[in-house]
Amino acid sequence: MSDDTNTSDGAKGNAARAGRAPLQGSDQALVELFDVALMDLDGVVNRGGAAVPHAADVIARAAERGLRTVYVTNNALRPPEAVADRLTGFGVPAQASDVVTSAQAAAHVLAGRLAAGSRVLVLGGRGLREAVTAEGLTPVERADDEPVAVVQGFDPELTYARIAEAAYAIRAGAWWVASNADRTVPTERGIAPGNGSIAALLSAATDQIPLVTGKPEAAMHAESMRRSGARTPIIVGDRLDTDIEAGTRSGTPTLLVFTGVTTPAELFAAPPEHRPTYIADDLRGLLRPAAAAVPTRPAPDVPASVSDDAADGGFAATCGRWTATVVDGTLTWSSTPGGSVSEPGGSVSEGDDGLDGLRAACAAGWAAADAGVPVQRVADERPPGCEGLRAPGGRG
């Protein structure tokens, strides 16, 4: 094995271990560190019927550099062949074997517990019905068919009558499995109700809670690893409570992109399980090195009498030229030598992707929150990328 190969393997192993800590850095582009990108679809590759800008180009360029993309979606509506055809129509390179859906994960879990041929009421679309059939089970549509289980997945054409059939079956004792619990789904018109919203309706009507198999649950990650054959994967997504939490639970590095439902303000308020390894505006972050946010405590130039008192805070983190500081519950920024931006309110220049100030703020704010002294106020003068931040424990 060549020295180059050893170096590459070592970097990938280090990257996998780094998945346990948020906002890590890398001198290499992320495409060099991983063998498979387990990539979400809605809000990452597409929004409804339109492709996300740059997605197709980045995925193709990443493949040329050795990073294979496997599309892992909590959307159970379409079978893998239809998903791949849809992606191809967007100009995104994809084959059916590149797609893993929450419908497949749900059907695999059902088949692991039910006898072959068992009747399952399918509350969902073609993707869910085909997945159930592929696992040797029998899909039905009515509670009168005496199904032993109900499987529920996203379907924008659901009717009240179909939801009622599922409720009747669940109340009669059928085992209820939901493909995912995403409360919302991004579309080209905005944010719409997702499968989790329908599950909440059914739960209210039946007094039952489903077994959820999609992200961030272990069943979905296991299905993704089984079908992709990944050795050193990175999870790429737009949702903290599914994509990023899936990485936290499995110890897999994650990249959060801001093309979907998550905002910088939501990231800033994220609990430990929702903190990503890397962040980027969009998928182009895969083609670049990653800037690290380095936290320190106490904060620089804070008197010991303050920094030693947990009630008063005293936390700081640096990323690029930006240093974010939390003292007495207030988050502020300052510029430091050797970076790429001059002062708060300034513009982004070479070496900064526009998110260094956000990375520093998150690292400092998370350290303060974890110590029990969350940020109460955010300074008015802010770097690029931090305009919408709000204090989780007080006022913005």
Image (tube, grey):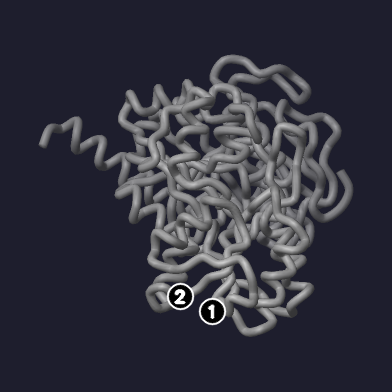
Query: Circles 1 and 2: CB distance less than 8 Å?
Result: yes
Q: From the top left corner, tell me how far across and down residue 14 is, in percent.
A: 34, 45
Q: Is residue 305 visible?
A: no
Q: Residue at x 66, y 44 (%)?
A: 362
Determine which quarter of the picture holds residue 273.
Answer: bottom right
Residue that numbered label 1 is attached to: 148
Q: Residue furthest left?
A: 1
Residue 147, compared with residue 250, is above or below; it is: below
Question: What amino acid is found at the position of numbered circle 1 in the picture?
Answer: Val
Q: Is residue 94 visible?
A: yes
> Which element type, helix, strand or loop, lies under badge 2?
loop
Residue 264, compared with residue 129, is above or below; it is: above
Q: Residues within 10 Å of mark 1 (few under 14, many from 20)?
A: some
Q: How many marks?
A: 2
Viewer-side residue, 214 vs 360? 214
> Label for residue 118?
2
> Which element type, helix, strand or loop, lies under badge 1?
loop
Viewer-side residue, 354 vs 137? 137
Tell me: 148 left or right of 35: right
Viewer-side residue, 83 vs 365? 83
Q: Which image quarter holds the N terminus?
A: top left
